[in-house]
Image (spheres, rainbow, N blue to C red):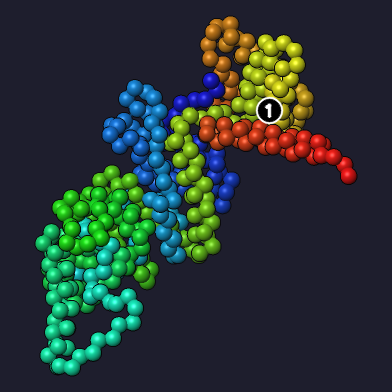
Amino acid sequence: DQAVQVNVHDQEQMTKIVNSCIGTKFSSRWNDIMVTMALEAVLTVSRPQSSSSPAEIGTSVDGSKIMTEVDIKRYAKVEKIPGGEITDSNVVKGVMFAKDTVHSKMRRRIENPRILLLDSPLEYKKGESQTNVEITDEEDWNTMLKMEEEYVENICAEIIAHKPDIVITEKGVSDLAQHFLAKANITAFRRLRKTDNNRVARATGATIVSRTDEIQESDIGTHCGLFEMRKIGEEWFCYLDECQSPKACTIVLRGGSKDVLNEIERNLQDAMQVVRNVVYNPKLLPGGGATEMAVAIGLRRQGQKIKGIQQGPFQAVGEAMEVIPRTLAQNCGVSVIRTVTQLRAKHAAAYDQAMEENKPFQCHWGINGTTGDLVSMEDLGIWEPFNVKVQTIKTAIESACMILRIDDIVSGSKKK
């Protein structure tokens, strides 16, 4: 009942949540940029697991929750480029990788390109083990070279037949293949990482093909709006930008040195994890000890309805929950007993009123961590993701159970 539903597309509300996570970190001076980038990256890579559903992330047509897939590790790549300023950082709506074209004459800017992704080499196959070929006739040598050339030419012809603008392969591209592809006005990239290739496939709508003779029209990616080679510092980078609903992105971080970039990346990861937790379950709970005190009051009142010794656990867990507001009051240097008692009284009054009116119990009053005053967390803007809070309470109770079990085993053992 304490939870507040949140719209993951509401920029202002989401900014408040992420700010309470990274507000005290190294990157706090550039909070606005960090928050915007984290939101953009997570919402780009998130998609409902039931792909047939037309609903938005987080809710379905009938209002029930859809399980959302948010794979930040695989599909939100962070590319750190030393130089420039932190304010130059941005999220590419597509994929970017540090590769140059294999041939200098190939096109370096294409609008709405057709992209083909391969998992096979565009060169003559070499023997797995050490291979010796003995040639007695001079003509045989020429025949062998010709066969190699024909093999490569045949592979290139199969590719050219589907009229792609860009060919990206995870393996090598021979000089002869480069010549044929450049002649057909096709831009090629070689030895791309498997992970990068997967992201390109997801962003452009292409399918990775393992054999050139099995290429189909449906394997060609057409969702990319712009391919461009850009030089940043000393290196050339390939940008596949302006993709239609990419579902994969690249975060380009700029900064003065590698240490600054590493720290910024860590802060950005924290921000993205917060957004991810909210996208998984778009509910928020008030911070400042408000949730813990509300749970404590609720447990105590439930415990009072039970007679006998069974109400013990309810009272014990309720008392344990109050450790958070108590610690906050201690840190502020205010009177702990008076502050916690006042907070308890506020929550108890709100609980009784909710029960009388037969409404859900909601009380967002907590402790201001700076002044020690009692304030509404809605006014202070301190919120925590629902998933995190639930997991914290579960872990605490399970850890306590585990410690008690160990004590039981130790006390039950016979003394020698």
Residue 15 is situated, as x and y percent measured from the top left of the image, at 46, 38
Residue 360 is situated, as x and y percent measured from the top left of the image, at 53, 15
Q: Is 72 situated left or right of 350 in this image?
A: left
The amino acid sitting under disc 1 is Met
Viewer-side residue, 312 vs 26: 312
Which residue lies at the image location 77% right of the left edge and 28% below the top edge?
335
Question: Compared to 79, does 412 lie above or below?
Answer: above
Which residue lies at the image location 69% right of the left edge and 12% below the top edge?
306
Counting every numbered tag in the picture gives 1
Question: Which part of the image, by quadrant, shows the C terminus?
Answer: top right
Farthest residue, direction top: 356
Question: Compared to 244, does 121 lie above or below?
Answer: below
Specify whether residue 224 is in view: no
Q: Is 37 situated left or right of 120 in this image?
A: right
Residue 92 is situated, as x and y percent measured from the top left of the image, at 34, 52
Q: Quadrant of residue 241?
A: bottom left
Residue 379 is situated, as x and y percent measured from the top left of the image, at 55, 27
Which residue lies at the image location 19% right of the left edge and 70% below the top edge?
106
Task: Provide the residue designation for mark 1.
Answer: 321
Q: Is 101 situated left or right of 20 in this image?
A: left
Q: Residues within 10 Å of mark 1 (few under 14, many from 20)?
A: many
Viewer-side residue, 239 vs 338: 239
Which residue lies at the image location 13% right of the left edge and 59% below the top edge?
162
Question: Compared to 65, does 98 lie above or below?
Answer: below
Badge 1 marks a residue whose secondary structure is: helix
Farthest residue, direction right: 416
Q: Is 60 situated left or right of 398 in this image?
A: left
Q: Quadrant of residue 159?
A: bottom left
Question: Compared to 362, does 191 lie above or below?
Answer: below
Specify whether residue 387 is in view: yes
